[in-house]
Image (cartoon, helix red, strand yellow):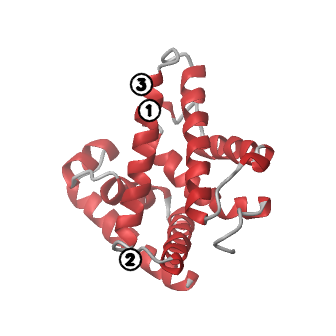
Amino acid sequence: MSQTSPAPQWELERYRNYLRLLARLQLDGRLRGKLDPSDIVQQTMLQAHQMREQFRGTTEAEHAAWLRQILVRKLANATRDLGRRKRDVGRERSLAAAIEDSSARLEVWLVEEQSSPSACAEKNERLLRLAEALEQLPEAQREAVMLHHLRGFSLAELAGKLGRSEGAVAGLLHRGIKRLRELLHDLE
């Protein structure tokens, strides 16, 4: 993809796993029975496709940021539609900040600060490969890796959230990271 032209509409599919990862990180576990991150991402992709002419960015990073903004609105609307809370602009801002934080954690996890256009393009490619590899992990391993490395949960917090012992969670993390490294190597 060129660094100087907007991402073509068919390139949206490349971002599906990345957006699903961000949606999973932000969707409250209590709502997962009613909201599926894949459905939210599908709605995000549909709106992005419908609004593609409105995208004014010129880089992949701007395209990813635009997609994250759409995702924030879709998550906020879906949560509000469930009747849990009425429209709350502060909550939407909080959700936007949380998604940006998750995205930043993904970036930090992969690389140190880079500024050249080719380095930024490479970083974006790695983010997309990481999201694709995470999708291939078994659910328990994926959730453990995401919560620990991308949300900063401690082993004790993870054990409580997942209803497992700390030893079992450590095993999930170990196997998940090992498999993730294999998958990332294969994707490269």
Q: What element carries label 3?
A: helix
The tag earlier along the polypeptide, 2 or 1, is 1
* Lateral position of residue 178 relative to residue 10, left or right: left
Query: Mark 3, residues whose alpha carbon is within 10 Å: few (<14), some, or many (≥20)?
Result: few
Query: Mark 1, residues whose alpha carbon is within 10 Å: few (<14), some, or many (≥20)?
Result: some
* Lateral position of residue 65 relative to residue 177, left or right: right
Residue indicated by mark 2:
178
Residue indicated by mark 3:
90
Asked if labels 3 and 1 touch by Cβ distance under 8 angstroms, the answer is yes
Q: What element carries label 1?
A: helix
Asked if labels 1 and 2 touch by Cβ distance under 8 angstroms, the answer is no
Tell me residue 174's x, y (percent).
31, 70
Query: Mark 2, residues whose alpha carbon is within 10 Å: few (<14), some, or many (≥20)?
Result: few
In the image, residue 183 sits, relative to residue 147, either above or below, namely: below
In the image, residue 72 sits, relative to residue 61, either above or below, namely: above
Judge by depth and name the residue closer to the eye, 38 or 111: 111
The residue positioned 66% from the left and 41% from the top of the image is 39
Amino acid on which the number 3 mark rests in the picture: Gly
Amino acid on which the number 2 mark rests in the picture: Lys
Tell me residue 173's x, y (percent).
32, 65
